[in-house]
Image (spheres, grey):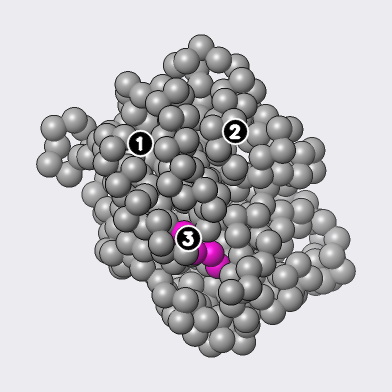
């Protein structure tokens, strides 16, 4: 069994560590050491840069065929907090932001019981017609698997249809936790781990870049987290299509798992650092500021994160409905630059594909 000192040396030398070694590091390394190792790994990839983009979210509905125990977003038809936008309403949302300078439109929502892939292909075409300069990053693997299956298409056929309509990237949501036994307990109705990987694998083979996530801080163990990260590392070795990894913290407001509470900020920082250390082949680690809040996001930049997402423009409700501090999430460029500077880093605007933008 390797010692903490031996594992630390491997990380410093850029050598890949195993799951057993990751567990020792996670349990035994002091917080300052994890931060130091993650920062060294981050600087090898992105130097002193903190990436952000100008973006907004379009969330077509919070009606959903699935009823995950950790979800605070889902509502049933007729609930006063439910919404189900028409195509015209969604077009107007995009028109209202057409002059915002956004370079990315992030489209995710509930898995609608009635809409199939042709509805969403038309949505993408409409959005692209209004903002042709913005990249469309759309639909989690869970949404995609459902809409493609509903239309009777293969995964590749469905993705090709959406690509032809204007979809350019896929977000990482729906991964939750890959361990099949645990997944069956917290989201038994949701698409399987195999389906999540099938969608991302097919997207990568078609040249579509995607992100990946984990939902942590609920009833999973460290072994579950490490297993999740290693499965992503293996997939990246095969296809190389993941742009970024985003650890998503479980928030306990308004869902059926509320009694378990939330993990500490220290645990958040450890999760970020270990993600950067273990995922040596995924370029970017994102500290999603809407989830963490601005203060924790600043700390995250000293624990391996090199991206904090974007301006958002008060366009997402997923985490505000789960009790996040920012109930109307907006981040100005000046705030982003200040957060980066306080951490001794430099804010750099990017597009969806991490090409740097100079204005």
Q: Secondary structure at mark 3?
A: loop
- Measured along the vertical axis of the image, is residue 4 above or below residue 200? below
Q: Which residue is mark 2?
A: 163
Camera-side mark, 2 or 1: 2
Q: What residue occupies the far top of the structure in this picture? A: 152
Counting from the top left corner in percent of width and height, residue 86 is at 27, 34
Dominant secondary structure (helix, strand or loop) of the stretch shown in magenta = strand
Q: Disc 1 designates what residue?
A: 110
Q: Position of residue 295 (x, y in %)?
A: 43, 77
Res. 218 in view: no
Dot 2 or dot 1: first in sequence order is 1
Q: Can you identify the residue that label 3 sits on?
A: 102
In what element is the residue under mark 1? Answer: loop
Q: Position of residue 320 (x, y in %)?
A: 30, 58
Q: Is residue 316 above or below residue 74?
A: below
Provide the residue span drawn in magenta: 51-55
């Amino acid at each position: 069994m390797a010692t903490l000192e031996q594992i630390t040396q491997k990380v410093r030398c850029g050598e890949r560590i195993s799951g057993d070694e990751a567990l020792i590091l996670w349990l035994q390394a002091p917080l300052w050491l994890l931060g130091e190792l993650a920062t060294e790994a981050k600087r090898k990839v992105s130097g002193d840069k903190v990436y952000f983009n100008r973006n907004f979210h379009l969330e077509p509905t919070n009606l959903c065929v699935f009823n995950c125990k950790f979800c605070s977003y889902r509502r049933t038809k007729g609930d006063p907090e439910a919404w189900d936008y028409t195509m015209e309403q969604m077009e107007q949302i995009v028109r209202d932001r057409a002059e915002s300078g956004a370079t990315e439109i992030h489209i995710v929502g509930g898995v609608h019981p009635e809409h199939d892939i042709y509805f969403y292909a038309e949505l993408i075409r409409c959005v692209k017609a209004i903002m042709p300069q913005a990249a469309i990053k759309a639909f989690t693997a869970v949404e995609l698997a459902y809409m493609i299956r509903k239309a009777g298409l293969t995964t590749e056929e469905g993705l090709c249809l959406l690509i032809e309509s204007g979809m350019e990237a896929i977000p990482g949501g729906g991964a939750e936790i890959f361990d099949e036994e645990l997944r069956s307990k917290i989201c038994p109705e949701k698409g399987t781990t195999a389906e999540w990987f099938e969608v991302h694998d097919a997207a990568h083979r078609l040249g579509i870049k995607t992100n990946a996530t984990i939902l942590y801080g609920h009833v999973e163990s460290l072994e579950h987290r490490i297993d999740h990260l290693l499965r992503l590392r293996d997939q990246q070795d095969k296809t190389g299509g993941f742009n970024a990894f985003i650890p998503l913290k479980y928030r306990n407001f308004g869902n059926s798992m509320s009694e378990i509470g939330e993990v500490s900020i220290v645990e958040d920082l450890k999760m970020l650092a270990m993600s950067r250390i273990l995922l040596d082949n995924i370029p970017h680690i994102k500290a999603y500021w809407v989830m963490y809040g601005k203060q924790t996001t600043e700390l995250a930049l000293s624990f391996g994160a090199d991206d904090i997402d974007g301006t958002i423009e008060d366009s997402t409700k997923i985490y505000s409905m789960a009790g996040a501090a920012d109930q109307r999430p907006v981040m100005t460029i000046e705030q982003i630059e200040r957060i980066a500077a306080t951490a001794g880093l430099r804010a750099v605007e990017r597009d969806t594909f991490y090409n740097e933008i100079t204005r």
